[in-house]
Image (spheres, rainbow, N blue to C red):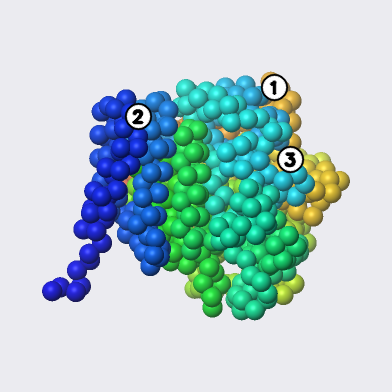
Amino acid sequence: MNTGQDWRPEEARKSLNRILPEVEQLFSEQIREAGQDWHQFKHRLYSEWERLFVCLHHLYGWQYDFFYTLHRILYSLVSYWLERPLELKLLDAKQEAKPFSYVSEKMVGGVLYVDLFSDNLSRLADHIPYFKKLGLTYLHLMPLYTVPHGDNDGGYAVSDYRAINPDIGSMDDLARLTSALRDEEISLALDFVFNHTSDEHAWAEKAKTGDPDFLAYYLTFPDRELPDQFQRYLRDIFPTVRKGSFTWCEEMNRWVWTTFNSYQWDLNYANAEVFRSMAEEMLFLANQGVEVLRLDAVAFIWKRLGTNCENQPEAHTIIRAFNAMARIAAPCMTFKSEAIVAPDEVVRYIHPDECQLSYNPLLMALLWEALATQETKLLDHSMRKRYRIPDGCAWVNYIRCHDDIGWTFDDQDAKEVGIDPVGHRKFLNRFYTGEFPGSFARGVPFQFNADTGDLRISGTLSSLAGLEDALSREDNDLIKRAVHRVNLLRSIVMSIGGIPLLYIGDEWGMLNDYTYLSDPAKATDSRWVHRSRKRWEAREDLSDQETLEWRFFQDMVKLTDLRKNIPAFQNGGMEVISTGNPHLFGYIRAFEDQKIMIINNFSDRSQKMDGTVLTKYGAKNEAVNLLRNEIIPIGGEFLLGEYQPMWLDIS
């Protein structure tokens, strides 16, 4: 007997063959109506079941009712697929015929808050022509589910995943919007907040009554013995708001695990019913037309005593199980991970069988780092080591998002290029809050931790890049320089390997909005400084060609149009090159016969580059700067102006 043989594939097939006939009998009429589509579903089911079984067995195979868990999950898969609208099943077939479309050079993303952008979902559809002009192919709507009134962490304390916040619309409004976006080939992205619910969610309300089934949905404790043991290893996420990761609940007379805010109750994924219930919420969202699902706070979803309860192996297993279920019942849906953790941990969530897309917090942090230092050594070194990800996956590159900026570079990377990581983070915080002499930035501090010295930064792209400061000084030279910084960063996220993601408002130069300080529900959270209500008169009526807003917007449109017409940008591959100048950051994008070299000057002074570098990477006669349609010599030196990017076709 070969005791090393994995018995699970055979048992997976056996379990499916035993359970499926029972489930088919329950849905016999709907299955007959589905016709040939049912056979396609069964093909995906048999293709993915083994992977799903292995994940579920790893998580729950030790439980006495594991077979019941399998039965319930199969029932969910079949029922939600049968409910899936025909147009989405057609989209599934299209995606299966052409997988990995999200690595296309045509992909450009945008993200916004519905209430701040258009008041409600119905009015949002009126702005689809604006999104088309901007070149967007997917639109991420920040959390729009029902949440508690008052504090709700910007929508990330969800009370009902199947209901829209009535202040902005209804599920019917979302369905109409999704259909309208799909008609214009814009994919909808929504958040999947699956680490926690609000304390007003129906599950939490039932737990408060003492219902043992729903008490088991959360991590609760009768006293401080276990919480104190866990807390020894946990970090505070919002240290200026609260200390510790546990909240006392008077209704239950128990402590509740609350990693983020006291009203956000962490779910207990050691309970198979929690996994199944959240999987059904995921499939429900998929059936509303969601094509990109942002998995929120992926690092925190599994707890283990004696660890910091972040990035545990089971977190990856849970996501892979969700991935397998989506492949079976909604294969057009793509996962995007949100893991703002150490760079080595971020990469572990990226895989075709886990999250096909991932935010790139390291690139964001290091772009701002290079802008502050005017040197590219840490950016260059880190991107050489940490940019490569599995085939069929893509980074989502952004300059800033709805959240803060944290300095998530790797300490060892910094030391390898002669930088003290602790001191450097202090410098960056001083620089971007404007405390450092000569700083151009107008950032706002977020969540200073007195125990660790950790601090993060809030602010819009333009305010952090110096435009707010320059305008307040009424200095045209400083304004020009700030515009160049903004355009440099936008050029990089448009050209480096992956999908560019714009926070809507940055395309026309939105500045910090300090009115949040007068709102008691927002005043303690500085991230609202860059979550401002949009000024439509400054954007969709961009007819005055003398305004900065008009120039910013037009430059953004030209950049997205150019990106979409460069075949070399159609995959995530990127090779960092040696520019020979410490102020220049360069990389190659190539596909088939086209090769583009991108050079970026992070200095406020013109910088020279040796033209022989072009020949080293394949240029033969001349290079064309696609951003200005100019010829660059490949023999002698050439100049890049202050903060100037170049997209050089060296094919």
- Observer-side mark, 1 or 3, equals 3
In the image, residue 85 sits, relative to residue 230, either above or below, namely above
Q: Are marks 1 and 2 in contact (CB under 8 Å)?
A: no
**Quick check: can you spot residue 610?**
no
Residue that mark 2 sits on: 30
Give the SS element for disc 3: loop
Q: Which percent across, then down, holds residue 376?
A: 54, 60
The amino acid type found where label 2 is placed reads Gln
Residue located at (49% from left, 61% from top): 271
Q: Earlier in the sequence, mark 1 or mark 2?
A: 2
Q: 144 or 247: nearer the eye?
A: 247
Give the SS element for disc 1: loop
The amino acid type found where label 1 is placed reads Asp
Q: Quadrant of the C terminus?
A: top left
Give the SS element for disc 2: helix
How far separated are the C-alphas under marks 3 and 2? 47 Å
Q: 47 or 209: nearer the eye?
A: 209
Q: Quadrant of the N terminus?
A: bottom left
Crowd band around label 1 with a 10 angstrom C-alpha radius: few (<14), some (14–19), many (20+): few
Crowd band around label 3 with a 10 angstrom C-alpha radius: few (<14), some (14–19), many (20+): many
Crowd band around label 2 with a 10 angstrom C-alpha radius: few (<14), some (14–19), many (20+): some
Q: Earlier in the sequence, mark 1 or mark 3?
A: 3
Q: 47 or 389: nearer the eye?
A: 47
Residue that mark 1 sits on: 541
Picture quadrant of residue 478: top right
The amino acid type found where label 3 is placed reads Ser
Residue that mark 3 sits on: 532
In the image as oriented, which residue stretches furthest toward the left?
1
How far separated are the C-alphas under marks 1 and 2? 50 Å
Q: In this view, does 431 lie to the left or right of 31?
A: right
In the image, residue 271 sits, relative to residue 185, either above or below, namely below
